[in-house]
Image: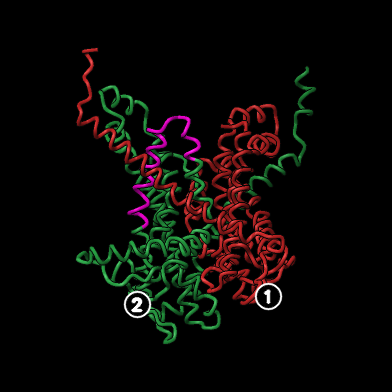
Amino acid sequence: MEAVALAPALRRPRLAGLPDRVLRWGLTGLAAAILLLIGFFFVRLAIESQPAFSKFGVAGFVFDNNWDVSKEIFGALPLVVGTLITSAVALVIGVPVAVAAALFVTELCPRRLRTPLIITVDLLAAVPSVVYGLWGFFFLVPKLRPAEQWFADTFSFLPFVGGHVAGPGYFVAGLILAIMIVPIVSAITREVVATVPPDHKEAALALGATRWEMIRTAILPYSRAGISGAAMLGLGRAIGETIAVTLLIGNAPQIGKQIFDQGYSLAAVIANEFGEAANDPTHRAALIAAGLVLFVVTLVVNAAARRVVNRRGSAVTP
Amino acid sequence: MSGLVAVSPGRKRKEMAMRGVLALATGLALVPLALILYYLLKKGLGAFSGSFFTTDPNGNFLGDPGGIKSAIFGTLEMVALASAIAIPVGSGVALYLTEYGRESRFGKAVRYFVDVMTGVPSIVFGLFVYITLILTGVGGGFAGWKGSIALALLMLPIVTRSAEVVLLLVPDSLREAALALGAPRWRVVGRIVLPTALPGLVTGTLLAIARAAGETAPLLFTATIVQGTSFNLGDRMNSLPAQIFADVGQAQDRLVQRAWGAALALVLLILLLTLVARFVSRRSRLA
């Protein structure tokens, strides 16, 4: 009896499902728009850089060692090399420091120090790139120059070392990049290390391992993939970093003969030359092509890094 | 105690050495931060004065170069508009990912590309906006709102990722309880999921705002660098990072000093946002 009376009351009004459908398809639309945006992004960059690629060829653009604005010749090899050298310096210096800091914070330091240390390391990420550039320009370059000159003179028998040190150059730019990638590499390494099963660590300690032996035998093997993923994310950052490098690399469109020489990077050339290139279609296309190369390379590096990091199933926030 | 095997001196030495190395590396990571903050305060405070905040750059090479009023207002206006775009869109995408697309193929693809988008260099966003909005001449040439769009593109993946993480922390039992009581999905989202996750969402967006406020590269050829203050986002607009970039490397001490002052103001602004974000996240009921 009662069920019969309730049935009409329980029936939903005709339009009750509408807001639900609106919400669902609205949100799906937004998500789809993101994918479309990235696709559109790529297509527009490709179209606008077409004049440069058709004039010089893709290989010619990327591998020709001749960037001469006045002669309208755009071979981006000096820029590619500059980006690679500075990123390599950043990884070699930044990754060990970042990983060590992450291990220290998670495994060795007193519990009370942990949160303050994490907050302080993360603060490095809050400093804007232009401030790193400013500080590097007025502090790092002049302070490091004598040390670099001494190093260049003393170890001139090494390859890529020796000669006159101008001040700004690959090494200083790479060093600033190293400082800038420390927070992200360190944060992801911390998350990866946190996913090591406590059983592994306790087993190592129970067998009599010291703390370091536990780190070496339990933590590092387990998190090796994740740490290399973190390093690759750092690499992605270093490749794309613009303003700090623009201020510190010296902006000379040639391949330096040694590590302290002045050079140029893909991102820096865009920041510096785009203003004057607006009225010159070939130059503009060449700079957009540099942007496209940057876009594709960082996309590939990041995609690979995410794959490696996510394989461990750790949720990583940027 | 004789049953326990003592750690041999060699292993003990290695242990102490490695602990020292790791502690040293941690200290090394913090040295640049300390040096940067020290120099910012030392050089930046000297530039601060009443007129520093109330005058525009005037382009005079000799004499008083003016202050950073236009840069402060430009940054605030452009970041506000960028947030107004990126926060709703980013949160919406995150809602899709947690409420509808957790396991679907499409959801995974979106999540993956949002992740990848966090790594796109900021200058590429600037290039993209230049190509699509300035080259085509939509609404005139360089403009503040075009800078905002570049910043919004940069913020979008950060907002989405952080919002998704927070929304996932909302217990499924809450959603199920509401659905079981007969609430339609949109009310579950509006009355249960979003309010529960709110503090975390605020934290994520504040961090994204802090990031956008410090970006130079996307603004260089979208909003450009100008002198005057403007309250019209259709005009060219100055910003703190762009002003610093323009002043670094000028062979004039007072311009360099203005750069330090502007850098200190910018870092203080970002630190404030970051600290508020931390405070909000600490008060969160989740996690």
Residues at badges 1 and 2 in contact (C-beta under 8 Å)?
A: no
Q: Seen from this angle, which residue lies furthest bottom?
A: A71
Residue at the spot of label 1: B140
Q: Circle 1 sits in a helix, a strand or a loop, which is it?
A: loop
Is residue A129 depicted above or below A120 in this figure?
Answer: below
* Residue A248 visible (yes or no): yes
Q: How many marks?
A: 2
Q: Which chain appears red?
A: B
- In x, y percent, where is residue A167? 39, 68
x 58%, y 30%: residue:
B171
Q: Do labels 1 and 2 share a chain?
A: no
Q: Give the residue type at disc 1.
A: Gly
- In x, y percent, where is residue A180? 45, 54
Residue at the spot of label 2: A60
Nearer to me, A251 or B57? B57
Is residue B37 depicted above or below B193 in this figure?
Answer: below
How crowded is the residue under tag 1: few (<14 C-alpha within 10 Å), some, or many (20+)? few
Residue range highlighted in magenta: A90-118
Q: Which chain carries label 2?
A: A
Q: What predominant SS class does the magenta segment belong to?
A: helix
Nearer to me, A283 or A313? A283
Location of the C terminus of chain B (image quadrant): top right
* Residue A32 visible (yes or no): no
How crowded is the residue under tag 2: few (<14 C-alpha within 10 Å), some, or many (20+)? some
Is residue B104 depicted above or below A237 in this figure?
Answer: above
Quadrant of res B150: bottom right
- In x, y percent, where is residue B89? 63, 52
